[in-house]
Image (spheres, helix red, strand yellow):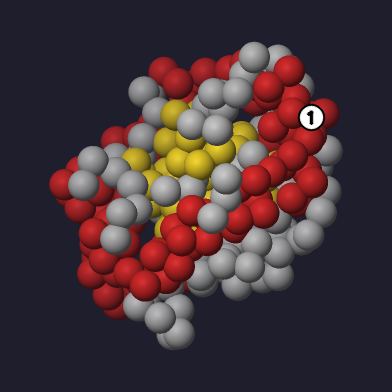
Amino acid sequence: MGVRGERAVQIAPSILAADFSRLGEQVAESLRAGARRIHIDVMDGHFVPNITMGPLVVEALRPLAQRFDAIMEVHLMIEAPDRFLAEFSRAGANAMTVHLEACPHLHRTVHNIRALNAQPGVALNPATPLVMLDDILPEIDVALLMSVDPGFGGQQFIVATTEKVARLRAILRARGLDRIEIEVDGGVGEGNIAELARAGMTIAVAGTSVFNQRRSVTESIRVLQTACAAVA
Ligand code: DX5
Ligand code: ZN
């Protein structure tokens, strides 16, 4: 098991890269392979230049996730996400991550997520500095650092993210907030997952490195887990 101190690195398969004609099957395979956090990318064509899925998909996957006691996290790449939090919660989302860049009243949004009994997360685009998280950190469970500009799967990892993860982990330690998960999203795969884990990442979003033509979902997850296991 990959560890950072006492903590295992969780692989969160991003279903954006899955074969949607076999979505249930593919998610089931990832759960059987040990995934316990399903990453669901919600895009609105405004905050990002793409449109993807909404609460219907979360609802459809809910029985499967419940069977494995897995978390369903929605990554809300949408303007004014407050409008949809209750609906995603009803559909079964138990972790909700909003973009700092889309939330003028972030403190309220985070509290709205907590009030729905979901884990609140805040995401930063690659060009948004860590300092923007300073005041909200004590209120959140997950800090998601984008390692690509959001909108599409299969993009190239922005290398500077690794150092950003290390800086954030140092800040969390210094402030007694080490419980907060650092999640990295975009271009994460066998080539960089170990280094990210060493820097302090605890959740790795994996789209095309889990759902691809090269290997089965099971094998892909094993490869990522093995790469993390090498981290001392
Ligand atoms: C990008 C999404 C990611 C995406 C990651 O905007 O937020 O979750 O699915 O896909 P990969 O792992 O292929 O970069
Ligand atoms: Zn995502």
**Can you give x and y, in whole percent of width and height, for residue 182 in the image?**
60, 38
Label 1, on which residue? Answer: 132
Callout 1 amino acid: Met
**Can you give x and y, in whole percent of width and height, for residue 57 in the image?**
33, 56
Which quarter of the rendered picture does the C terminus lie within? top right
Q: Residue at x 49, y 53 (%)?
A: 229
Q: Secondary structure under badge 1?
A: helix
**Can you give x and y, in whole percent of width and height, for residue 28 in the image?**
24, 62
206 left or right of 24 in image: right
Disc 1 crowd rating (10 Å Cα; few below 14, some 14-19, many 20+) is few
Residue in the foreground of this view, choosing between 16 and 91 = 16
Q: Residue furthest bottom?
A: 213
**Can you give x and y, in whole percent of width and height, for residue 133 in the image?**
73, 28
From this view, report whether residue 23 is shown above or below residue 167: below
Residue in the foreground of this view, choosing between 51 and 75 = 75
Q: Residue at x 40, y 28 (%)?
A: 118
210 left or right of 60 in image: right
Q: Residue at x 78, y 43 (%)?
A: 164
Locate residue 88: give its quadrant. Answer: top left
Q: Residue at x 42, y 44 (%)?
A: 73
Callout count = 1
Does the image show residue 102?
no
Does the image show residue 13?
yes
From this view, report whether residue 75 is shown above or below residue 89: below
Mark 1 CB lies closer than 8 A to ligand 1? no
Locate residue 168: give its quadrant. Answer: top right
From this view, report whether residue 72 is shown above or below residue 137: below
